[in-house]
Each structure stands twice: as C-alpha cells, then as structure tokens.
Image: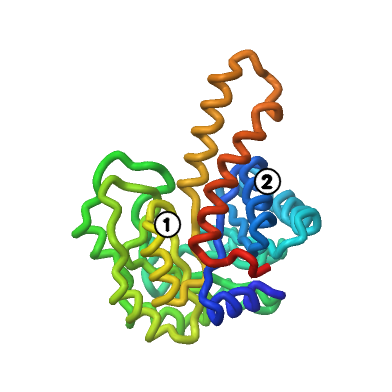
Amino acid sequence: MTARDWFAKAQSEGFAIGAFNVDNLDILKAVCEAAAKKKSPVMLEFSQGEVGYFGLENIVDLVANAREHYDIPILLNLDHAKKVEESLAAVDAGFDEVHFDGSELTFEENVQYCRKIVEAAHTKEILVEGEIDKISGSSEVHEQDLNLETLKASYTDPEKAAKFVQATGMDIFAAVFGNVHGTFPNQPDLDFELLAAIREVLYKTFLSMHGGSGIPAEQVKEAIKIGKIVKINVNTEIRQAFRDALVEEMGENPEQSTYYKLTPDIVRAVMAVVEAKIDVFGSEGKA
C-alpha cells in the first residue's frame, strides 16, 4: 500500500497515523518497536536538521531496513522543509511524503513553490503536505504561557486554505486550530467548530495535525472524528522522554562509558510514549 492508500484507509476507518520525529537511532528503534508491538502503521519523519545529522541516503536505507526487520508499514516524511531544493531532494531519494512549509512566504510564493514540488512528487506517487499558517511554538517544553489572543490570529482561514489547495494540487493540508508546537502551561483547547469548517471546504483533501504533544487524549480523538485527521505529528513528548531517561541512566551509572549499555531503559521510555499515542490515535491493529 502507498502512503495515499494508508491515509485513505485512515480517513475511511476513523484513525490517524502517528508521525514521529527521529533525531537519533534510539528513537527510531523505539518508534518501530512500539508500532510493531501494537501492529500499527507508523510514519518516521525527519526535519532538515535531522536530515543533516543522518544524511538523506542513510535515512532512506535505515527506513528500508526497518520495514524489512519489523514487518510493519513504515512511511517516510520530510518534515517542515523550508526550501524547494530540500523538498525535491527528498522526492528524488524516494520519501513517501514531503511537507513543504511555506508559511513564512507570501501566499503567492507559497503557491508557486508548492506547485513546483507537487509536479515533481506526483510523477513518483509521492504525497505533498502544505502549510499556509505558521504553527506557533517550538518542539520543547515551554515554561512561559502562550498569548492566546495572538495565537488565534494564526488559525487557518478555511476559504484561504481552499484557494491554496486548489491552486497547488497538494495532498495533505496542515491545519491550525489550536494545535501548537511544544507544550505550554496554558495549553490551548482545540477549536472544533473551525476544524469542522476546514473539513467542509477541504472535503477531498487529507488533513494533518501538527503539535500532537500535550493535547488531551479526548480532544485528539474528537479532532480525528470531526476533522477526519489522518496524520498527527509528535516530537516534544518523545524527545522529553528520551532526555529524562538518558539523564536518569547516566546519573545511576556515572562510570559507564559504553553508550549502548545505557539504552535499553531509554528505548523503553520512548516506546511507552509512542504506544500511548497509538492507543489515542486508534491505529492499533491496523497494520
């Protein structure tokens, strides 16, 4: 099954596929082992910084090996690419999806660049995700409150979204309706009325939800139901689980200099987060 097939299945059966950022081999292993345990499809995604760390060709090989080893559907995504050439490189490398983030461009530039990527990607049956509204925050645990009024100004305008999708032909729209990158003390509630309006105008388009960390489980389930969300990005919670477990292991084993001997509990800590997300997303047993 292609990425399009999997998202169509998710949409028709009412579940979402977790898209987990990978910035080291332990997180890659944890996500794959959790998905295999839950018999769930999963998406591994890499930001441009993570691509710089691993190398584009190495990522493709790692994911190909993981698919064979774990025997589950593993989709590969380039996350928040800011440049056309980055996106086209991922297309040429054989990623399943490319997310072009043109939210800092003018609407006209965003359309122009996204359309160019779509033309190249669709010749290889690769999906393109687009974004017009900059998603607030960053992938970390924030200690300061969000300015909720400012945040609401960044929410998706359904009609503008419809124009963007029609003009570009892209496949997955990254909607903003209360979802943010990272976690905050005053985590906003999702705007389900707005989500329903976005779903109505983009009835032929897949919807994604970035900022899957910190959102209450019941709100996530409601977003999947109302918006037919098919892809939910998660980064902050798995990074935090990794960091906390690593600090704990190093504190308990200060003399240990062989890294792989520290990793079993670290992998289990990240697995626990991924398994919990799979439960919420409803993708268990769908592989």
Tell me which numbered mark, 1 or 2, is placed earlier along the sequence.
Answer: 2
Q: Is residue 126 above or below residue 23?
A: below
Query: Residue 285 in the image: x percent, y percent?
Result: 64, 66
Tell me the quarter of the picture where residue 41 sits.
Answer: bottom right
Query: Residue 113 in the image: x percent, y percent?
Result: 50, 71
Secondary structure at badge 1 equals loop
Query: Residue 22 in the image: x percent, y percent?
Result: 59, 48
Question: Mark 2 = which residue?
Answer: 29
Name which residue lies at 30% across and 53% down: 187
Q: Quadrant of the C terminus?
A: bottom right
Name which residue lies at 52% across and 27% down: 247
- Relative placement, left or right, of 263 versus 226 is right
Name which residue lies at 40% across and 81% down: 199
Name which residue lies at 67% across and 42% down: 25
Under mark 1, the amino acid is Gly
Q: Is residue 136 above or below residue 160?
A: above
Question: Mark 1 = which residue?
Answer: 211
